[in-house]
Image: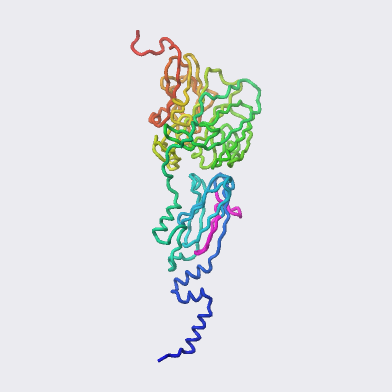
Amino acid sequence: MKTTPSLRAIAAAVCVLAMPLSVQAQASLPASAAAASQSSAAATLKRYELQTNIVDGKMVFIDAKGQVNPVLAAKVGDTVELVLKSGEGAEHDLLIPELNVASAKFSANSGSTSVRFKVTRAGTFTYYCSIPGHRQIGMEGKLEVAGTSLAEAGAPKAAAAGSTGSESSQAAALALYTPAPSPMRGPDPSAVSVAANPAQVPVAVGARAPQLLKYRMETVELPGKLDDGTTFTYWTFNRQVPGPMLRAKVGDTVELTLFNAKDSKMIHSIDLHAVTGGHGGGQHTQVAPGQEKTVTFKALNPGLFVYHCATPLVPQHIAAGMYGMILVEPEGGLSKVDREYYVMQGEMYTGRPHGAPVHQEANLEKMANELPDYYVFNGEVGALSKTHKLQAKVGETVRIYFGVGGPNKISSFHIIGEIFDKVYSEGSISSPKHDVQTTLVAPGGATIVELKVQHPGSYLLVDHALSRAGKGAVGVLEVTGEPVPGVYHAGAVH
């Protein structure tokens, strides 16, 4: 028998049909799923503009209100759009690995970029730049997401870009966005020698009135030959390691312009230990790719002083090759010698073992733990034994300007088979020591040694922490001529 619906049932059906479709759907869903639907219905587009810059010596993200590393806010179900721009010109990116979010790399050369994603999880998540060293020096902030995660509310999990929505595919997507060591690749065939010629020492200043000296230097990032069959991306002053030796006199005024090559990915700068004020120049020479800045200073103190890049992460820039020296001569100049040489020691931290036939990349964890893979004179293994050699003749006096770029290790500088007749410890010219076998040089420090050579042969420049010789810290002083009688010979007395 056909049953006629009651008036009350008909009225209820009419009420349901009159509801908005979204409410109808909720009426037929369990309470938890309905809550998810409400969250989705209230979803909005959250748009943030973030610009990178340097503030108080740190690299940071800044929002449109000038907030440093701002806390970003959203609700579950919102779509978030991040518009990213390099304010200082260097290369950056932005990652939120927990949400499968990764932007393209961006810089002044590439212009701004953006990344858009839907938030499906509640919680506090960290966003940061993954360029090596940038997160460590301040480039990270928080994204706070309010609400109930869609999966917890009974709705299907939102899939990351390229994901099907399954647990396995989401894990695969997350792996795409999680920073990982770069794949091993062979040595860069375009690599060149960056080893500074130790004989390229500016001419002596001597006795003269104070002058205005103008120097211009360029910071360049380029692939260089680290070892036989091994290459590395060096960051340099004037395409060499160490950077060019500068020479002035007490009382001189020095105008120094620093230009950063247009194709650089990093900001660079210069801090000269001979400078009083302005963080040695580092405060006012933070130079973006394609730009230049100038500082002027007076040479107040005589001595041999190190300079280096002072852009965060400072030890990373130094370990990549950004160091050099400036000599400030005293009144009347230095005593005359027959030959002068310019040598600096540094250490390098690489992702692959010493001698691996690959293009090496910097390893910041090893750097933080002070575990170098290489110790080098003038930037590369063999720089002062294969690429260049120091040379002298019997009877000549040799002066070596020696410094340590570091960034971490002290050098015990020694020449096997010779004794230093004079040592100007710590780069101080005021009171030399005499008859020294080995001299300590701190990272960021320097010394001047002099020796008169009296016997022909190959004399080895080493750090007398001798295991470092096996990691590259060896140079050669080649002495020719007739030996001074009685100084040395093989065998017994005749």
Specify whether 280 is left or right of 101. right
Relative depth, front residue between 310 and 301: 310
Magenta run includes residue 99: no
Relative depth, front residue between 248 and 264: 264
Relative depth, front residue between 409 and 109: 109
Tell me residue 349's x, y (percent).
44, 38
Q: From the image, which quarter does the C terminus lie in?
A: top left
Question: Which corner quadrant of the image does residue 70 belong to?
Answer: bottom right
Q: Is residue 395 above or below residue 428?
A: above
Q: Which residue is drawn at the image coordinates 49% and 83% (left, top)?
A: 13
Tell me residue 379's x, y (percent).
48, 31
Outermost residue, bottom side: 1
Q: Is residue 222 above or below residue 94?
A: above
Tell me residue 180's x, y (percent).
43, 48
* Residue 1 visible at all: yes
Q: Is residue 26 above or below residue 64?
A: below
* Residue 438 visible at all: no
Q: Which residue is drawn at the image coordinates 53% and 17% (left, top)?
A: 338
The total number of labels drawn is: 0
State the extent of the magenta-drawn residues as a range. Answer: 60-82
Q: From the image, which quarter does the N terminus lie in?
A: bottom left
Magenta run includes residue 67: yes
Q: Which residue is drawn at the image coordinates 61% and 40% (left, top)?
A: 291
Question: Which corner quadrant of the image does residue 159 belong to?
Answer: bottom left
Outermost residue, left side: 492
**Colouring scheme, one of rainbow, by chain, secondary structure, one colour:** rainbow
Tell me residue 136's x, y (percent).
49, 46
